[in-house]
Image: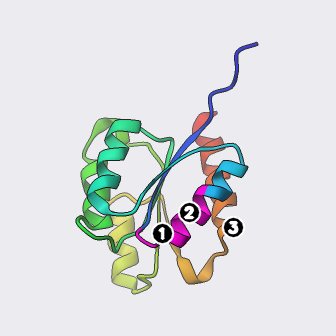
Amino acid sequence: MPKEKKLTILVIEDDVFLADLYKTKFELEGFKTYVAYEGEKGYEMAQKNKPDVILLDLILPKMSGFSILENLRAQPEFKKTPIILLTNLSQKADVEKGLKLGGTDYLIKAHFMPSEVVGKIKKLAGAGKS
């Protein structure tokens, strides 16, 4: 029986503690997880690794999450990739902009426990693979 391919997740988050927390949680759930602590590196890692799901902060050094989202969505290979925006930006205009640019979901960090975010990602990853 062929070994099932591990789903890959890219976490682009400048809060090192939070990024590492998510990395640990995802790996415990069996995901292969990449982490980038700044925007340009995250964008490069997305290009190189073609993850199944991207967890993206919007306020990042070197390249904003909005720019990453817009650039990825302009490429055919990222049209259907779930990109979850996980941010502290809670203004209606930011939420609308994030979704308009192609965010799959918009989660406000203060409103979601990491375990809830992991649950959402598992659901999305499962839906994307069927």
Image position, residue 128 (x, y; %) = 57, 40
Q: Residues within 10 Å of mark 3 (few under 14, many from 20)?
A: few
- Looking at the rendering, in which quadrant would you find the N terminus? top right
Q: Mark 2 and mark 1 in contact (Cβ < 8 Å)?
A: yes
- For label 3, the residue is 116
Give the quarter of the image for residue 21.
bottom right
What residue do we see at 51% from left, 41% from top? 52
Q: Residues within 10 Å of mark 2 (few under 14, many from 20)?
A: some
What residue do we see at 30% from left, 61% from top? 39
Query: Image height check: is 80 above or below 18?
Result: above
Image position, residue 41 (x, y; %) = 31, 54
**What is the chief secondary structure element of the magenta stretch?**
helix
Kindly state the secondary structure of the residue where label 1 is placed.
helix
Residue type of the residue flagged with mark 1: Val
Q: Is residue 83 left or right of residue 75?
A: right
Image position, residue 91 (x, y; %) = 39, 87
Residue type of the residue flagged with mark 3: Glu
Check residue 17 for magenta coloring.
Answer: yes
- For label 1, the residue is 16
Q: CA distance from mark 2 to mark 3?
A: 16 Å
What residue do we see at 61% from left, 81% from top? 111
The colour scheme used to paint the residues is: rainbow
Kindly state the secondary structure of the residue where label 3 is placed.
helix
Q: CA distance from mark 1 to mark 3?
A: 19 Å
Kindly state the secondary structure of the residue where label 2 is placed.
helix
Which span is picked out in magenta?
14-23
The one of 6 and 95 positioned closer to us in this rendering: 6
Q: Is residue 46 left or right of residue 114?
A: left
Give the quarter of the image for residue 59.
bottom left
In the image, farthest residue toward the right:
1
- For label 2, the residue is 20
What residue do we see at 33% from left, 64% from top? 100
